[in-house]
Amino acid sequence: MATPLWAEVEIELLTAEAGGRHTPLSISNDIPGLYRPHLKVVGGTGALLGVAFMDGPDDAISPGERTHATIKALYEPAVSYAELISGAHFEILEGPQVVGRGKVIRLAD
């Protein structure tokens, strides 16, 4: 079985006024994998890519803030994550709602 894709990402949560979250988000490594949104690559096929946030800052991120985090692909190899390459820009979706944006900084080795 193939090893799932891991990536370092930079994200920014949208404010509630911009249609994003109303509450802060905790993605620290104290609770790895708890936050599991979908990503959609900007300019890509439109495929929804399920990921788990495995590591991030110790403090919760408030809407409007930026941070770095580590994600893991959830559905490889059944779903192709080929669009999620270094430099790719993506939207973060909770259901149909876009709650943030981000960029892949690098793929983990």
Image (tube, rainbow, N blue to C red):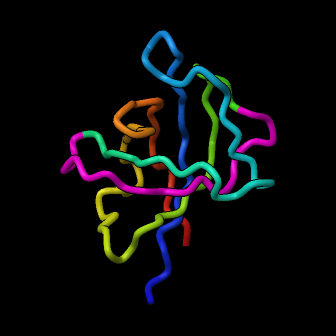
Find out whether residue 59 is within the magenta segment.
Answer: yes
What is the x, y in percent for residue 90?
37, 41
**Left or right of 73, for residue 29:** right
Q: Residue furthest front?
A: 95
**Left or right of 64, for residue 86:** left
Magenta stretch? 43-60
Q: Is residue 38 above or below residue 54?
A: above
Q: Residue furthest bottom?
A: 1
What is the x, y in percent for residue 3?
49, 80
What is the x, y in percent for residue 67?
64, 36
Residue drawn at the location 47% of the way across and 66% of the way down: 74
| Secondary structure that dominates the magenta span | loop
What is the x, y in percent for residue 1?
44, 90
Q: Is residue 76 above or below residue 103?
A: below
Residue drawn at the location 37% of the way across and 57% of the way down: 85
Residue drawn at the location 31% of the way across and 46% of the way down: 41
State the image quarter where residue 11 is shown.
top right
**Left or right of 90, for residue 106:** right
